Structures are given as structure tokens and as C-alpha cells.
């Protein structure tokens, strides 16, 4: 079979454009290198609790409204528990939202694309398993450095200025405490020079315990990213005790995001290194879920308006 579109990456931008192209009657296959979808819309279970350890919510904007209405119709969306904050999260975690989008999509997990080759029959995507896929068009929705690496490995030229777009790293602590970290704390951003944000998972209803997702700042994350998880835990515990006093931690896990968000962005919503290849994501629409959606929506409108779809 030759697909109309092969999408590499099942984060929010890849799922969104796959969802829109699928409803336009195009044949679509989404290839995801890991065992689940969602990218930074990620939820992890620890014992009987759940932690959102990437994005904590999605803001309602014109660009996210269609998805929010879709999730609302499925009764899986909940208002983020901060007053005057028009944002939402998934019942059971952010991963629930992306899984709902993927339900009716043709999605192949554990499928890392290693090369692209243009053939008389279409683009051949070779997977690390040795299998291959044929498609008329390719959409790369993974983080930009990974997309560029795939283009390099496939000898497909691209604008070298794309390599000037860098990503901030992020270290995230998932902690369970015997007592609240701070009274009445549900969510705070720009906490201080070391901690970017703190979100109570109990406040979101994901846990009955005093569980928190703590995202470290870009500088702190960059300075400590190369350390082992155990070393990061020890330094974090010292830091938390300094900032919050005695903290009786019953469980502690670390999540590292190598490509948390772009520190700059491309001037257009997508990029074409070849007439049949497209790059989308937060490096093109902006460093947020809505930025990633802005990019995927911009390309979807272009493709759906074309006569070949």
C-alpha cells in the first residue's frame, strides 16, 4: 500500500494533523518510535497515584477549541483548578486526551524511522526493524533536532538556519509527601530562579496523596542534566529543604525532557525541504501545546485545500 501521508511522531501536532487529514479521506499512517502517543502530554503512574509530568493543561484558544470540544463530547475533560484560568486537563491525566484522538487513527508504535528515500513509487520510510513504508508525502512532527537528523541521514538538504533553533532541557521532579508542600498551593509558575513551576496532582484529582510535579528552570536543568537520576534527586532534596523547610518525601522520581521547548522559532508555520516533505511542531508555531497546534493546523489547511487530498 502507498499512503497519502506518513506522519513521523505522535505528539500533539502529529496527532492533530493526522486527525484532520483522516477526516478529509486521505490515507494516513502515523509512526511513533515509543510505545505510546502524546509526547509532552504525558502521564505516569506511581503506585496508586498519577502524575502529569509534561504539560499540566491546555489553554482554550481559537486554535485548540475544536479539540477541546471533541474531548468535552467524550466526557474526559476537566477544568484546570485555578480561578480565571481558561485551561483544561484530561480526567485520568493528559495522556488520556491524546489517546482519545488516536482511537480511530492508523498508528504504528515502536517504529523509529531511520531513513527516507525517494523512489518512483513514492517515499520509502525505512524503520529500525528493517520494515519499510511507502507514502506520497511525509510529515515530520517530532522535535526539530530529530527531524533534521533524519533529513541528514537521508541526504535531504534543508535550510541550515534551522539548526540555529535550539531547545531548552527540562528536569522534572515527581514527589510524594506526607504533608502539603505549601498550604493552598495548586499551581504556580515562575516560582524562583531554580524552580519554574509547581503543580499539585492532588489538586487536579489525579492523586489522593500530596503529590507534586516540580519543573526546574532552564538554567538549573541545563546545569544538572548530565547527572544521574540519583545525583539529581540528592541535589533536589537539599534544594527543596532549603526552600520549603523539612520535606518528608515518601517517593521521588525524575523525568528528563531533552527537547522541552524551543528557545526560538522559525518564521513560518511549517517548512518544506522537498515538495513532498513537511516539518511541523512547536519550533514553527511557538513553544507550547497551542503553538504546536498552530503549526499542524496551518499545514492541515494547506494540504486539505489541495486537490490531491
Image: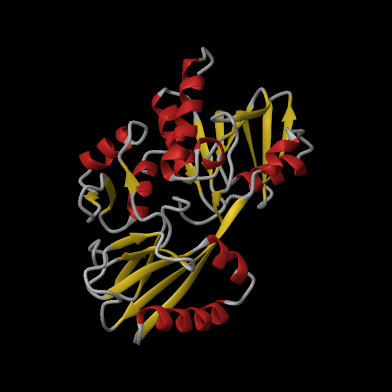
Is residue 16 visible in the rendered structure shown here?
yes
- Count the numbered circles shown: 0
Relative to residue 34, is residue 245 depicted above or below? below
Corner quadrant of residue 70: top left
Picture coordinates of residue 138 (x, y %)? 61, 32
| In the image: residue 92, left or right of residue 284 | left
- Asked whether residue 106 is in view, the answer is no
User: If the image is split into quadrants, where does the N terminus sit?
Assistant: top right
Viewer-proximal residue among 179 and 83: 83
Residue drawn at point x = 41 percent, y = 29 percent: 20
Q: Residue furthest top?
A: 307
Left or right side of 171 for 56: left
Pick out the residue farthest to the front. Answer: 193
Q: Which residue is at the front of the view, 79 or 221?
A: 221
What sort of colour scheme is used for the picture?
A: secondary structure
Q: Residue furthest right?
A: 155
Residue at x-position 77% and y-position 33%: 157
Question: Is 16 situated left or right of 65 in this image?
Answer: right
| Residue 199 rendering spot, x and y as whole percentages | 33, 64
- Place of residue 163 in the rendered image (x, y in percent of width and height, measured from the top left): 71, 43
Quarter of the view holding residue 212: bottom left
Q: Position of residue 190 (x, y in %)?
A: 41, 59
Of 148 and 99, which appears nearest the observer? 148
Name the residue rendered at 52%, 15% in the picture. 306
Amino acid at each position: 500500500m502507498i499512503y497519502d501521508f506518513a506522519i513521523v511522531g505522535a505528539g500533539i501536532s502529529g496527532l492533530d494533523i493526522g486527525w484532520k487529514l483522516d477526516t478529509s479521506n486521505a490515507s494516513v499512517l502515523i509512526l511513533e518510535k515509543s510505545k505510546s502517543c502524546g509526547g509532552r502530554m504525558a502521564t505516569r503512574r506511581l503506585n496508586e497515584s498519577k502524575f502529569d509530568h509534561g504539560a499540566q493543561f491546555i489553554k482554550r484558544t481559537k486554535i485548540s477549541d475544536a479539540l477541546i470540544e471533541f474531548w468535552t463530547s467524550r466526557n474526559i475533560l476537566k477544568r484546570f483548578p485555578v480561578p480565571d484560568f481558561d485551561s483544561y486537563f484530561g480526567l485520568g491525566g493528559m495522556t488520556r486526551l491524546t489517546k482519545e484522538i488516536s482511537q480511530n487513527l492508523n498508528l504504528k508504535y515502536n517504529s523509529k524511522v531511520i531513513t527516507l528515500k525517494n523512489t518512483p513509487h513514492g517515499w520509502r520510510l525505512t524503520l529500525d526493524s528493517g520494515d519499510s513504508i511507502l507514502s506520497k508525502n511525509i510529515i515530520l512532527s517530532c522535535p526539530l533536532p530529530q527531524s533534521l537528523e533524519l533529513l541528514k541521514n537521508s541526504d535531504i538538504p534543508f535550510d541550515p538556519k534551522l539548526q540555529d533553533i535550539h531547545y531548552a532541557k527540562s528536569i522534572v521532579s515527581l514527589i510524594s509527601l506526607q504533608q502539603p508542600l505549601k498550604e493552598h498551593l495548586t499551581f504556580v509558575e515562575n516560582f524562583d530562579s531554580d524552580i519554574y513551576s509547581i503543580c499539585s496532582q492532588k489538586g487536579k484529582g489525579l492523586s489522593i496523596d500530596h503529590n507534586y510535579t516540580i519543573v526546574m528552570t532552564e538554567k538549573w536543568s541545563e546545569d544538572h542534566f548530565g547527572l544521574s537520576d540519583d545525583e539529581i534527586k540528592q541535589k533536589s532534596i537539599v534544594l527543596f529543604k532549603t526552600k520549603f523547610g523539612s520535606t518528608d518525601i515518601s517517593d521521588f522520581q525524575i523525568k528528563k525532557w531533552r527537547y522541552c521547548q524551543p528557545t526560538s522559532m522559525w518564521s513560518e508555520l511549517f517548512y518544506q525541504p522537498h515538495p513532498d516533505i513537511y516539518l511541523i511542531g512547536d519550533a514553527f508555531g511557538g513553544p507550547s501545546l497551542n503553538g504546536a497546534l498552530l503549526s499542524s493546523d496551518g499545514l492541515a489547511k494547506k494540504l486539505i485545500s489541495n486537490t490531491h487530498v
